[in-house]
Image (cartoon, rainbow, N blue to C red):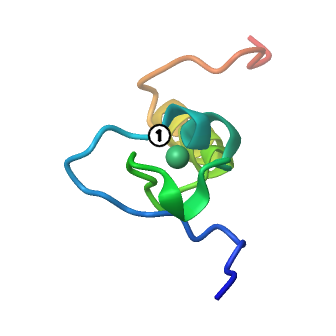
Amino acid sequence: MMVESSEYPVRPGIKDCQFYLRTGRCGYGENCCYNHPKIKPTVYFDEAIRIREILAEFGFIHTEGDGL
Ligand SMILES: [Zn+2]
């Protein structure tokens, strides 16, 4: 069975695979001994921006270039 599309081992309690976290890919695939959470780095990035926008909307942080 050859499943190559983002099916990496999820191992709760084990250290996250740094390579996977950075690139969203792992060369070891299912043989890797590290944890591969089902969230891709781009999702982290989008989520960070969204949280920033929400915080800015409530006035917790300043937005850059707000025209004042
Ligand atoms: Zn890995």
Seen from the viewer's position, the closer of residues 48 and 3 is 3
Q: Is residue 45 left or right of residue 36?
A: right
Q: Is residue 10 left or right of residue 55?
A: left
Numbered marks: total: 1
Task: Judge whether residue 53 can be spotted in this image.
Answer: no
Residue lying furthest top: 68
> Which amino acid does the dot numbered 1 rest on?
Cys
Q: Residue at x 56, y 44 (%)?
A: 44
The secondary element bearing badge 1 is classed as loop
Q: Position of residue 62 (x, y in %)?
A: 56, 17
Q: Position of residue 34 (x, y in %)?
A: 39, 45
Seen from the viewer's position, the closer of residues 14 and 49 is 14
Q: Is mark 1 within 8 Å of ligand 1?
A: yes
Q: Residue at x 51, y 32 (%)?
A: 18
Q: Position of residue 15 (x, y in %)?
A: 31, 38
Q: Is residue 47 left or right of residue 63?
A: left
Residue on which the image places disc 1: 17
Task: Judge whether residue 7 can be spotted in this image.
Answer: yes
In which image quadrant can residue 12 be found?
bottom left
Q: Sort mark 1 into few (<14), some (14-19) or many (20+) by Cα contacts within 10 Å.
A: some
Q: Position of residue 14 (x, y in %)?
A: 26, 45
Q: Looking at the image, is 31 positioned above or below residue 26?
A: below
Q: Residue at x 64, y 21 (%)?
A: 63
Residue lying furthest bottom: 1
Q: Looking at the image, is 38 positioned above or below residue 52?
A: below
Q: Considering the image in quadrants, where does the N terminus appear?
A: bottom right
Q: Looking at the image, is 26 positioned above or below residue 10?
A: above
